[in-house]
Structure formats: C-alpha cells, structure tokens
Image (cartoon, rainbow, N blue to C red):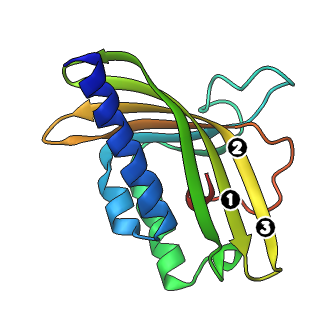
Amino acid sequence: MSEHSALSLATDVLHREATALDERRWDDWLALFFEDCEFWIPTWRSEMELISDPRREVSHMYYTSRGPLEDRVYRIGSGRSPASVPLPRTLHLLSNIAVANGSPDRLIVRSSFVVHSFFQRNRQTGLLFGRYEHELRQRDRWGILKKKIIIMNDHIDSALDFYLA
C-alpha cells in the first residue's frame, strides 16, 4: 500500500469514528472496533511521563476487549449512567494525522485531537485535547485493534467517558 493510500485509509477510519461519536451513532462507533480490541486512556505518572503498564497502574480507562465498551454504550442508552444524563453535545476535531508505521494489513496512526463539549445539565462547556494512537488492522475489513488516548489537560472538568475523548 502506498503512503498516500495508507494515510487516506487511516484518515477515513478516524473521521468515521469521530463523526459516529459526535452524532451518537453508538453502534456504528462500536462496529469500528474488533472484538479483541484494546481501549486505553493512561494517566500521567509525572509532569512528563505517562504510566506504562495499564494492568498494574491506574488508568482513566482500560479495556482489553470490546465488551466493556458495549456495556458503556448500553448503560448510556438505557439512562443508567447518571453522569451521562443528559448526554453532552460533542465536536471532535482531528489534525496532524500521520501513519507512523505500516504493512499491508496493519497501520499505526498518530493524530492530535480537540474535543469541545457542552453539558446541558450545568450549561458549561468543556475542552479536552491530546493525542491519539490507533492501531488499525485489516481482517475481514479495516478496523481498530488498539486505541490509546493521551489527554494533555491538567484538569478534567467532568466525568470522563468514551464519547468525550
């Protein structure tokens, strides 16, 4: 696959993910992830160092399969997630999308993000910014095998959930 084709494919997957989150199309969002995916939002160990072992250190979120993401989507849809009622409106902005490494069936993609949100409950706006690291794989389709979300904010104003990052 050419460098241009890899970048175009990666950009398409990342934009479809961001759009599905912003439009609350949870099933479309989940469908981008493989069953054996990893979803990780690490915490900062120090000013300049992230934790390195999500199995032994505290993370904002760490899931080793799609099942827990499906559970989160179910709770949000059922209204059983008090922190998510009402759901905030979000706008995910992506930039600096780059394929860091690739092969015919695997792409490592790095990008930057800003997520603007509006919380109806308290009439407040929120802002998260940081970097994404995606591992995309070709199996029966191109999908997300790993997603790492590095949040650069020093202070997070709301309960953190998958749709905010």
Q: Residue at 62% x, 25% y: name it.
A: 53
Circle 3 residue = 125
Question: As drawn, is 120 to the left or to the right of 143?
Answer: right
Q: Distance of mark 1 from mark 3, alpha carbons?
A: 7 Å
Q: For the view shown, which residue lies furthest in the left direction?
A: 140
Residue 132: x percent and y percent? 55, 35
**Who comes first in sequence, dot 1 or dot 3?**
1
Question: As drawn, is 47 to the left or to the right of 57?
Answer: right
Q: Is residue 106 above or below residue 83?
A: above
Circle 1 residue = 116
Q: Distance of mark 3 from mark 2, alpha carbons?
A: 14 Å
Q: Amino acid at mark 1?
A: His
Looking at the image, how many numbered discs can be counted on the residues? 3
Tell me whether circle 1 and circle 3 mark residues in contact (CB < 8 Å): yes
Residue 73: x percent and y percent? 46, 68
Q: Distance of mark 1 from mark 2, alpha carbons?
A: 9 Å
Q: Residue at 41% x, 62% y: name it.
A: 20
Q: Amino acid at mark 3?
A: Thr
Let me know if residue 66 appears in the view. no
Q: Residue 6 sits in which quadrant?
A: top left
- The numbered dot on residue 129 is 2
Q: Residue at 77% x, 61% y: name it.
A: 126
Q: Is residue 27 above or below residue 57?
A: below
Residue 85: x percent and y percent? 65, 81
Let me know if residue 48 appears in the view. yes
